[in-house]
Image (spheres, coloured by chain):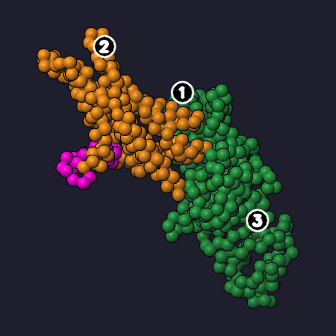
Chain colours: A orange, B green
Amino acid sequence: MNAVWTIARHEARRIFVSPLAWAVLAVTQVIFGWVYIGMLMQYLQNYQTADQYTGVSDFIGGGLYGTATIVLLLVMPLMTMRLFAEERKSNTLTLLFSAPVSLTQIVLGKFFGLLSFVGALVLLLAAMPAALLPAVNLDLGRLGAGLLGLFLITMSFGAAGMFISSLTREPTIAAIGSFGLLLLVWLLRMPAQFDNGFKSVLEYLSLISHYQDLISGLFHSSDVVYYLLFTALFLWLTVLRLDIERN
Amino acid sequence: MDSDSLIEARGLTRRYGPNLAVGDLNLTLRKGEVLGLLGPNGAGKSTSMKMLTGNLAPTSGDVLIRGISLRESPQLAKRHLGYLPEQPPVYPELTVDEYLGFCAGLHGIGKKQRAEAVADAKRDCGLTHMSSRLIGNLSKGYQQRVGLAQAIIHRPDVIVLDEPTVGLDPIQIREIRSLIAELGKNHSVILSSHILPEIQAVCGRVMIINAGRLVYDAHIDAHLGKKGLVAQFANAPAASELQFTGVQKVDIGPAGRFLLELADGADPRAELVNAAVQRGWGLLELRLETRTLEEIFVELTSGDATLREAA
């Protein structure tokens, strides 16, 4: 466990000393801020129509966090592309492979390091509605479910991106590859609109189906389990991929 | 002798598809030995080193580090291993201290001893005054030293260095060499290179690999500087027929060539010519020479070489 912690801290440090992480945080914050203000203004325009069932929390949960998911789908591949591809390209992967640590420890360490970045993103998104707290009565449970959903889906993006990154030595290829994979899993639902034999299967597998309930504040443990399984699958595939590299 | 062998390779073989990269490599290294792995480009030096350090799984064979199998318990075995690959595995965005701290942690050095281990490694590699510099801003020579510091930070028994002086200027090469010689006193070092004087300067023992096979294994002082007789015959005699007085050892080279190792002061040339005439060997070439590593190397790698075992 010590080795996992060491690698995770190292990875987090490397993420946060790179200008890329700060650029991503800055750009996404500008977009999120813009959407957030837009949502608040929209609410102010229509507050008469708001009743006891819809409130500020819905606008933030459904609007801001919904948009955030799409933005994160675009930027997470940039954060995961370096994880293995760059290490392979600059020959630093050898350092990890010759050290007395297992492949599982390497993969988990890198993944937890990445989660520190995901955590920072989600915290910043939590800070926006939190700024309303002194003035507005927010449905914290609802926002909490939304943030949890956001964390889980970003974590899944991260795991899938890490796997793609372990396949190649070119970070840019890893980025476009993970973007393609994520978008595909996202859109698995599309054919499910038509009534065919796979409707329920495809709808279950799609990343987005499990998210919509969570951001609107409906907590199903099956949705949480879906994201955990999705993450575990790609972590396991990454370990397998790295093992092949030695053979 | 077996009890103090720190690293032992048994029948190490690696194939890439139909191509044999390394075939049946056996190697034993004892405490305090500096072994030079020589070979022309593409001979299989780097592949061998990757297998010795667990970066590449051998097709067959195994590596034992202090008797621990790298195949069966890789994590345990790698604790005793330090490896500097051809390109130093450094992160340009970290400082020397941050990087070495990470390496120490990776090798399981506890938090309390970490600062000391980092300081020792920096001192040994002459990096103390570079502690807070970003590795990416250091020159190639200093980056190489950081790579070397990484390989020795956990004081492993076996240090494997793949072409440690490649791309350095002559002064840096000298510094790195003296550092390796210093390390060789307390650790066992395996060093690969295709630069012959380098091997001669720092290694106590040399192995030559050609086309994936071990063709020479000897202690440097056992063969070098000794007089030898090179003879080539049209009808090659058996090696046993060449045991004239003063001949210590007969090596068979390619194309009817023989290398006779001579005792000090011995000169069996006249005797050899007589025998060649009487027995009809058809003497083509006869020359007395002092063998250098370079000659041995060229001889062994530029023809069909046979395996020789040195005394």
B27 up-or-down from A163: above or below: below
Q: Are marks 1 and 2 in contact (CB under 8 Å)?
A: no
Task: Report the residue at 26% width, 21% height from top.
Answer: A57
Q: Secondary structure at mark 3?
A: loop
Magenta segment range? Answer: A175-198
Which mark is on residue B132? 1
Residue, disc 3:
B310
- The reply, left or right, for residue A42 in relation to residue B75 is left
Task: Report the residue at 42% width, 46% height from top.
Answer: A233
Please say whether residue A247 is one of the residues in the magenta stretch: no
Same subunit, labels 3 and 2: the answer reads no
Task: Report the residue at 75% width, 58% height from top.
Answer: B219
Residue A106 shows up from this direction: yes
Q: Secondary structure at mark 2?
A: loop
Residue A56 in picture, x, y percent from top left:
23, 19
Q: Identify the amino acid type marked 1.
A: Ser
Task: Report the residue at 54% width, 33% height from top.
Answer: A5
Of mark 1 and mark 3, the one earlier in the sequence is: 1
Mark 3 vs mark 2: give the one in front: 2
Q: Identify the amino acid type marked 3.
A: Ala
